[in-house]
Image (cartoon, rainbow, N blue to C red):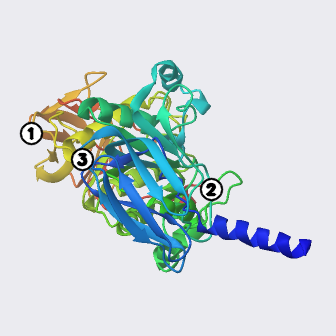
Amino acid sequence: MKKMLATFALLFILGKAFSDVRLPALLASDMVLQQKSAVSLWGWASPGETVYITTSWDNHTDSVMATSEAMWKLKVNTPAAGGPYTITFRGANTIKLENILIGEVWVCSGQSNMEWSSNQNLPQMMEELPKSANSNIRLFRVDRITSATPQDDVPATWKVCGPESLKGFSAVGYFFAKKLQQQLNIPVGIISAAWGGTPAEVWTPAPLVTSNPELKAAAEKIEHSMWWTVTPGAAYNAMIYPLTNYNIAGAIWYQGESNTKTAATYAQLLDTMVTSWRSKWNNDFPFYLVQIAPYHYDKQNIGALLREQQTNALQIKNTGMVVITDLVDNVKDIHPKNKIDVAARLANMALSETYHQSVGEVWSPMFKNMEISKDKAVLYFDNAKNGFVIHNGTKASDFMIAGEDKNFYPADVKLEKDKIIVSSKQVKVPVAVRFGFSNMATPNVFSKDGLPVAPFRTDNWPVPTPAETE
């Protein structure tokens, strides 16, 4: 008899546990929900159970029934930025989420230059921590985790920004959020999902990599490491897929260093990744990337070729790129310490392109076309309507010019308002020009708006590959 009663008690406890409403980590007190949108709310409950959801901003109650898979999901409309608000979920149990803000939500992802934080004693972050308390910035940091299959939840929690909660959080992500919050004067939620060393393949659904012969071949060439995964899809499944029910305004991306040795496929890979993210989020959100910084790679040209691929990736709709060739204190350190200015350029890009604020020019000058005039090459650019200027010196650096023999020589440079003219006594009939096209180049030519000219080359000649320069 006692055994039977114990069994009934266990069944009662288990039945009650299974009937409880449960929420994913993203839906929690202190979160920021995307303003003026139909945001998803979702979770788990016993099959057939009705979940009642009340939002305090309109005191409206919606209901949804859990499916046979014990899952439920619905959308609610959010107002303009504001708060704090509450959301109450009622089923067999009641969950009340508090201190919820409505504002703008961004994802920041990539490898170490996005992930780095106070954990690496970055001077800017160490200085920032004591003065970082801001209840209008909320942080959600996804820890490094992998999975062979897409996951529906992630171990993380929303935190109000402050000296303790900011420890270990992405410096670029934080400074980006801080500038948006100050300029827009509304709450900002920033979700960090980054992992040092990871190639872009791990952030892309594995079937999209393995089913493409070029992407698969490149992925197989990436060297394994004990410090990070190189398995296609592994970080996407565990660190990105669980976020995709959560409405966002956009994403920022700082990655590429680990793809330098397979640079030829990077633009295609990034297109595949961005398209897959947007498809899963069902949102063609803006995607702004950081061009990798100058660095003393051990293979010739691989940094230059990766930057070229990042520029090519701008053909993806609704993307932008910030150039940081001038924000490097040491080209022998792959982790530039200046994260504030990187974040500021990303934030200005978002403020201009996403929020349509007037913040000045946000695009670096980009090569448009070249004309040959006798022994000179005349270069034209986008995003340089006010002309060019030389920083740190009197001569423009890092321009190279070549004729049909494909031998490049340092060029003499003349800056004019709407063009740059280059020539060399060694090149009688110019055919090609390269600018900043090397691993470590830190060129000194800027737009008068203060942004560095993006590295480029006008030719498509074969460039020595890593294997050829070993």
Closest to the camera, between mark 3 and mark 1, is 1
The label on residue 427 is 3
Residue at the disc numbered 2? 145
Residue 22 seen? yes
Number of numbered labels in the structure image: 3
Q: Residue 95 at x, y = what percent?
A: 51, 52
Q: Residue at x 48, y 79 (%)?
A: 213
Q: Secondary structure at mark 2?
A: loop
Q: Viewer-nearest of labels 1 and 2? A: 2
Q: Earlier in the sequence, mark 3 or mark 1?
A: 1
- Is residue 133 depicted above or below 104 in this figure? above
Kind of residue sitting beneath label 1: Asp
Decide which of 51, 67 is in the foreground and name it: 51
Residue 76 in the image, given as x and y percentages of width and height: 31, 59
Position of the N terminus by quadrant: bottom right
Q: Is residue 119 left or right of residue 377?
A: right
Taking depth in this image into account, of 438 and 196 the one nearest to the observer is 196
As displayed, is residue 237 above or below residue 328?
below
Q: State whether residue 181 is above or below residue 349.
A: above
Which residue type does callout 3 highlight? Val
Residue 290 shows up from this direction: no
Helix, strand or loop at mark 3 = loop
Mark 3–mark 1 distance (CA, rounded to whole Å): 24 Å
Amino acid type indicated by mark 2 = Ile
Give the CA separation, mark 1 to mark 2: 49 Å
Report which residue position mark 1 lands on. Answer: 418
Is residue 58 found left or right of 382 in the rendered image?
right
Give neighbour class at mark 1: few <14, some 14-19, many 20+ (Cα, 10 Å).
some
